Amino acid sequence: MPIYVYETQPTAPGQPVERFELRQAMSEAALTQHPETGVPVCRVLSGGLVTFTQGALGDSCGFPAGAPAMGCGAGHCCRN
């Protein structure tokens, strides 16, 4: 099950914004209220996880095979 990030929507001036994470099934509807306080919330959209593997893309960092290694560490994924 994925973990979703939610953010409270202040209903009064000066009310702090709170972010929290919640594990939900993809089939579950997004929350509209904080489960503990009832304050309105919205789901925060963020980037996903991408994993590059060696193969058609070249080395494990997604660079073409044979490209000069300009990285750091054993995985040499730091490129200039």
Image (tube, rainbow, N blue to C red):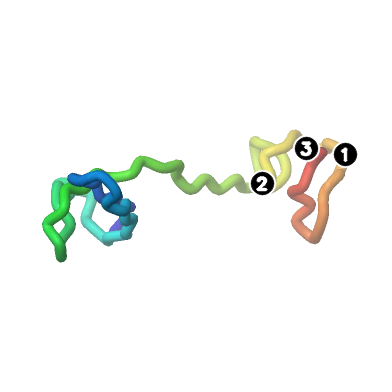
Pointers 2 and 3 in contact (C-beta within 8 Å) = no
- Disc 2 marks a residue whose amino acid type is Gln
Instruction: Give whichever of 75, 44 is nearer the camera.
Output: 44
Residue designated by label 1:
68
> Image quadrant of residue 48?
top left
Q: For the residues carrying marks 1 and 3, which lies nearer the camera in this image?
A: 1
Q: Check the image and name the residue furthest to the left.
A: 38
Binning the other alpha carbons within 10 Å of mark 3 as few (below 14), some (14 to 19) or many (20 upward) gives few
The mark nearer the N terminus, 2 or 1, is 2
Marks 2 and 1, how far apart in space? Answer: 16 Å
Residue in the image at 60% along x and 45% along y = 52
x and y, in percent, of residue 56 in the image: 64, 36
The mark nearer the N terminus, 2 or 3, is 2
8 on left or right of 67:
left
10 on left or right of 49:
left
Q: For the residues carrying marks 2 and 1, which lies nearer the camera in this image?
A: 1
39 on left or right of 50:
left
x and y, in percent, of residue 78 in the image: 77, 47
Residue in the image at 61% along x and 47% along y = 53
Instruction: Give whichever of 4, 15 is nearer the camera.
Output: 15
Residue in the image at 27% along x and 60% along y = 22
Marks 1 and 3, how far apart in space? Answer: 9 Å
Q: Is residue 39 above or below residue 11?
A: below
- Disc 1 marks a residue whose amino acid type is Pro
> Regarding mark 3 in the picture, which secondary structure is present there?
loop
Residue in the image at 27% along x and 51% along y = 15
Residue designated by label 2:
54
Residue designated by label 3:
65
Instruction: Give whichever of 18, 51 is nearer the camera.
Output: 18
